């Protein structure tokens, strides 16, 4: 059965041959770029820190010991440490400067808190040291 003329518009032309193979290639390229960017941002970190110990000193301070492993030991690193109270709230936070040196460094700091602390932890580290922490 033939369609009535003028009622449904012109019939579609099939995609040209180049468009049939180029669209999937473009999709794969875009996916590869997204995967690469994700790996660079979320993959292995150039600076890693892990808490090795903490000691609650009193109702307003905790001592935190942590280890920093970095790929470029000639660069200073800033690490953020924090304390949590019994209810899970963040009771204190501090930035700690780790000077250039060995690729693995152990650091200890005392953190003052606004509530009685129950734990101390390392939140993360970065090579982007703020100017107010820099020794230069």
Image (cartoon, rainbow, N blue to C red):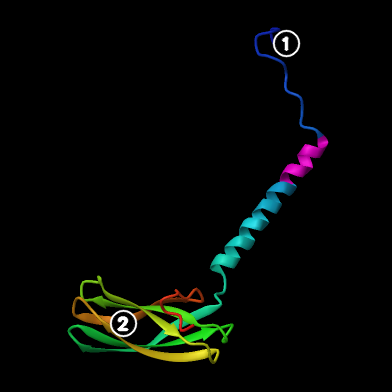
Crowd tier of the residue under label 1, counting other residues whose Cα lies within 10 Å: few below 14, some 14–19, many 20 or above:
few
Residue annotated with mark 2:
120
Instruction: Please report the residue visible at 68 percent of the width from the left and 14 percent of the height from the top.
Output: 9
Give the side of residue 16 with respect to residue 101, left or right.
right
52 vs 16, nearest the viewer: 52
State if disc 2 and disc 1 touch (CB < 8 Å).
no
Q: Main secondary structure of the magenta part?
A: helix
Instruction: Please report the residue visible at 52 percent of the width from the left and 90 percent of the height from the top.
Output: 104
As for residue 20 lying within the magenta part, the answer is yes
Label 2: which secondary element? strand
Q: Position of residue 106 (x, y in %)?
A: 44, 91
Against 44, is 17 above or below?
Answer: above
Q: CA distance from mark 1 to mark 2?
A: 77 Å
Q: Position of residue 95 (x, y in %)?
A: 38, 78
Q: Which image quarter is the N terminus in?
A: top right
Q: Position of residue 5 (x, y in %)?
A: 71, 7
As for residue 50 lying within the magenta part, the answer is no
Residue annotated with mark 1:
2
Q: Which residues are magenta?
A: 17-24
Seen from this angle, which residue lies furthest right?
A: 17
Q: Position of residue 47 (x, y in %)?
A: 52, 79
42 vs 58, nearest the viewer: 58
Seen from this angle, which residue lies furthest top?
A: 5
Instruction: Please report the residue visible at 72 percent of the width from the left and 16 percent of the height from the top.
Output: 10
Instruction: Please report the residue visible at 74 percent of the width from the left and 48 percent of the height from the top.
Output: 25
Crowd tier of the residue under label 2, counting other residues whose Cα lies within 10 Å: few below 14, some 14–19, many 20 or above:
many
């Amino acid at each position: 059965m033939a369609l009535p003329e003028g009622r449904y518009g012109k019939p579609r032309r099939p995609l040209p041959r180049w468009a049939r193979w180029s669209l999937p290639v473009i999709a794969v390229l875009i996916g590869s770029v997204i995967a690469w960017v994700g790996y660079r941002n979320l993959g292995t970190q150039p600076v890693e820190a892990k808490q090795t110990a903490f000691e609650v000193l009193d109702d307003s301070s905790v001592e935190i010991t942590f280890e920093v492993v970095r790929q470029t030991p000639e660069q200073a690193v800033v690490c953020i440490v924090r304390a949590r109270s019994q209810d899970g709230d963040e009771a204190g936070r501090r930035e700690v400067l780790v000077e250039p040196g060995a690729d693995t460094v152990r650091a200890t700091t005392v953190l003052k808190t606004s509530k009685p602390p129950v734990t101390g932890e390392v939140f993360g580290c970065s090579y982007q040291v703020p100017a107010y922490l820099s020794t230069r």
